Amino acid sequence: MLWLDEERPKKLKELNYHHDVNNMLIRLSSKNDFPHMLFYGPSGSGKKTRIMAFLHDIFGANVEKMKSEMKTVTVNRNDVEIMMISSPFHFEFNPSDAGVRDRHVVQEIINEIATNPSSGVQTGNRPTFKVIILNEADKLTTAAQQALRRTMESCVKSARLILVSENLSRVIEPLRSRCLLLRVPSPDGIDVATVLNDAAMNHKVHLAQPVVDRLVLTAGGNVRLALLLLEATAINNNLRCTPDTLVTAPNWVLAAESIGVDLVKGPHNPLALHRLRTKTYELLTRAIPPERIFVLVLDTVLRHGSCPPAAKGELAYWTAFFQHRCALGGKPVVHLEAFYARVMGVLAQYGRG
Amino acid sequence: MSSAKTEVPWTEKYRPKDIESVAHHEAVTKMLRNAIETGDMPHLLFHGTPGTGKTSTILALCRDLYGPKQMKKRVLFLNASDDRGIDVIRTRVKEFARIVVTTKVEGYPCPDYKFVILDEADNITPDAQSALRRTMETCSKNTRICLICNYVSRIIDPIKSRCAKFRFQPIPAAASLNTLRKIARKESLNTIDGTLERIVSTSGGDLRKAITTMQTAFTAFEMPGPADIDTLVGRIPDELVGQVYRTISSGQFDAAKRQADELTKLAYSVKQLMLQMNEVIFDDMLLSDQAKAAILGRMALVDRNIQDGALESLQLLDLLAFIGYSVQMDRGRK
Ligand SMILES: Nc1ncnc2c1ncn2[C@@H]1O[C@H](COP(=O)(O)OP(=O)(O)OP(=O)(O)O)[C@@H](O)[C@H]1O
Ligand SMILES: [Mg+2]
């Protein structure tokens, strides 16, 4: 088991930051009833941990008795396989696994769950509805999101949906209207450090303060990443992290950053642009979302000592511009390269001036 | 709550049962009442923002017309979770329109026409809409169509021109407050001053959202006050918005970048930020009208881009840098 999973707090009371949200969840959980919910916030900020702890407090430890299975849904005579995790009380899946058929798959699964009388062991005063967690709700196609509208209204007696999303604005307005929105911010450095120190203690790791700082900096508020990095760093150094132990960012981050460095350093010509293509393809084939590449490249360029301060506003503008284009469709590599070319242009212009 | 029974949420519990209880939309309800009396019902097109009563109104109308029992036979209700491709429109809707029903129910007008409701119609393809248009022509003797959508621009012109159109505006504060008060009375809630008002002012005319917020607030807090509502709905603290504005006004790009990173970590929605930033900028007496106009223009652009699916953090950085730059240039000019 990854340290990350071992360290995951099981109950709401054990959660160690964002007490506003936690307290509200605690109060809601004591009432055994809640509306459809949408948890939003950056990657690794603790959305999923809160959801599971919330369910734990309502339904008891049995929500952790999870099994995962491949579920086959037939859409127009095509079989779509989807990985489904379930406990006696809840179901969880990533609708985006179904690709363009997500609408049918989501409908099929929700209808099945909502119409089957609950099979969970009903003891005490637990709610009678089932909980359905939809991960990456922002990746659902518009058609699938639209289809959820009436479904959410009509299934509400037998099922409650919990949507999880990094980007609030990518969930269509009618769905936001049907959910209680819960914001889960990234924890700040001190909170991440606390999580790391606790984990280090539990795993008997000697962790010097400078290493904590490095981990916090590299993970940037992503607790999941912070714990993964801690585990990797600790194991590589035989559980002894001394003040000069280095922390290496994930490979793909380094690769994206190196594109940024190349852009600043120049030369600014078509050949240099062409050389970046291999790196870009490598990132894209590893399924790194293009938007992450835009962000990392921009951040690297802005941070670099030789980036002219006067150019920064324009660089930010063009990054936003091309990422928007990229989101509208087409091949990401085209938009990324147009973006690189523009960055080169802007830098060349300000460099000379 | 002591038993395992789960209640339906208030949004469903208090969904208007007849058109009389639909809040605010007098023009629509008056016209519908009139149409029931005269028996002269046009095809209908309802459009407007979420949670304003479109689905409720048509369901209430059908209940008023046919009564809860006959409704199932007389109304074909299709929403975005049903297949509504061209074939479905051609066959299913047509089949339904062909059947003649004349059963009358005591106490209900039960006119000879039936209703086909296409709710959540934003995604029906233009081709399917064209097919629908022909159905509308051939079956209008005994069938009325009601289309419901958020954006009227998604509906093709020939259909629009055959329907009586109604825009469901965001519900004004007074009407929303009225509805919340009624529910509060029925649920015997202990409300303190300002709480319901705050729920309404943060719901942006979406009554469904207002009701959900109210129910959650009274579940999660003993006696929720306005500040609890702010936490619940993710309103950004006003001090924070003010502080962001002051910091970026230096015109330094790095200041804008720091603020953008901070806001992104806090996960506040950029649309919410723009809403509140708008007020701050409006109130800045030192800022020229031209600068204000330029900033509003940029906000509109950012809003559109985000709607298209652009990454919020990049749009936010661009916006803050632009605002900072504009304010700085403007101050320098004087
Ligand atoms: N005008 C209204 N009068 C009374 N209640 C309303 C009104 N509008 C909305 N509501 C409340 O909000 C809930 C949702 O309303 P409704 O389903 O009619 O919204 P809608 O306009 O169809 O929204 P969407 O575009 O998201 O489908 C209702 O169940 C009711 O509780
Ligand atoms: Mg509706």
Image (spheres, grey):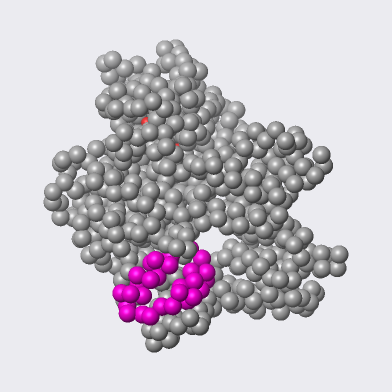
Image coords of residue A135 (percent x, y): 40, 58
Image coords of residue B285 (percent x, y): 70, 33
Q: Which of B52/A203 is in front?
A: A203
Q: Main secondary structure of the magenta part?
A: helix
Residue A253 as seen in the image, left or right of residue A22:
right
What number of labels is visible?
A: 0
Q: Is residue A206 magenta?
A: yes
Residue drawn at (35%, 35%), measured in percent from left and top? B224
Q: Is residue A305 magenta?
A: no
Residue B160 as seen in the image, left or right of residue A132:
right
Quarter of the C terminus of chain B within the rendering: top right
Residue B54 visible in the shown view: no
Q: Quadrant of residue B66?
A: top left
Residue drawn at (43%, 82%), measured in percent from left and top? A241
Residue A145 higher or lower than B20, as above or below: below
Q: Which residues are magenta?
A: A192-221
Q: Quadrant of residue A273?
A: bottom right
Residue drawn at (47%, 76%), measured in percent from left and top? A211
Residue A272 as seen in the image, left or right of residue B134:
right
Quarter of the N terminus of chain B within the rendering: top left
Image coords of residue A183 (percent x, y): 44, 50
Residue A291 visible in the shown view: yes
